Image (cartoon, rainbow, N blue to C red):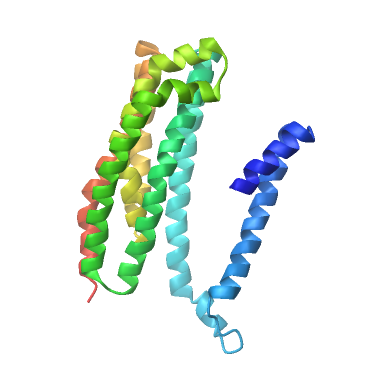
Amino acid sequence: NVLNMILSVLFVFVLHFDIEGVAWATLLSQLYGAAAGCWLMYLYGNFDYKNFDYKTVIEPEELTKILLVNTNLMIRTACLLTVNNIIAAAGAALGTVVLAANAVLFQLKDIMSFLVDGMANGASVFSGRALGQKNRALFWQILKMTYKWLFVLVFLLMLGFKFGSTFLINCFTDLEEVAVLAETYKYYVLIYPLIAGIGLALYGMFTGATYTVPIRNMMLIALAVFWPVERLLVPLLGNDGLWISFLIFVGIQSLILFYSLRKLGEKIYKIK
């Protein structure tokens, strides 16, 4: 990520590659990440390459499970991209200033998401370890710790945004008209972590357990609700309707994953 940022600045502002510079920076950073990952696996993977049974890598049953997990996550990503495109199109229809203000606020929303995602990734790793060790007590301990630190993180994010939102908005735009409009709608971003936090954190628990069916269903249901609500509220409330629709979208995700914990528990209870 740091390499991507450095190369983006170098290619765009120094070498004047324009938008192609951003593309090249991303591509080179991804290639570096792949190469570094392979090298770290070689150093620390403890693989016995000479006596390694490569047939176990392509075991049909296990490979099918992995493909199903990834397919469900791809469906989630497709739904998320669909919602983002609908929001961008609706914002553009409301005017370029609204579109720009929403873009700034969504950047700030994404920063919050990334911070919660970091915790979710940790929960994913350790929940996977608990399953691999068939340690039911460890799994529930991780769940409790995830809830505990999610509460702390959500509080800190909301507190920080409450008092630092003006500064953050001005970091993303120097256009007064855009900044003023972003100030008008910033309170939707303020409550975003409170509504979306549970869904973002539990996402890590479910992926760590390789139980991604609820994640797929969650996104399909949330998208099915979001689209008609957005069609209804935007003509009535304008940009407020768009933000309310989005918060309903992420709120449904949190509710469904919270409800699906029972099924995840049943999956854990099957461990001997």
Residue occupying the point 78% across, 32% down = 16
Q: Position of residue 52 (x, y in %)?
A: 56, 85
Residue occupying the point 48% across, 42% down = 78
Q: Position of residue 75 (x, y in %)?
A: 45, 47
The number of numbered discs placed on residues in the rendered structure image is: 0
Q: Position of residue 264 (x, y in %)?
A: 25, 58
Residue occupying the point 63% across, 41% down = 5
Examine the rendering and report whether any part of residue 244 can be seen: yes
Examine the rendering and report whether any part of residue 231 can be seen: no
Vertical order, 271 against 110 (above or below): below
Vertical order, 270 against 56 (above or below): above
| Quadrant location of the C terminus in the rendered image | bottom left
Vertical order, 35 against 41 (above or below): above
Can you name the residue that lies furthest to the right here? 15
Q: Is residue 167 left or right of residue 221?
A: right
Where residue 33 sits, quadrant-wise, is: bottom right
Vertical order, 40 against 227 (above or below): below
* Viewer-nearest residue: 118 or 78: 118
Can you name the residue that lies furthest to the bottom here? 51
Where residue 232 sits, quadrant-wise, is: top left
* Viewer-nearest residue: 65 or 156: 156
Q: Position of residue 24 (x, y in %)?
A: 72, 44
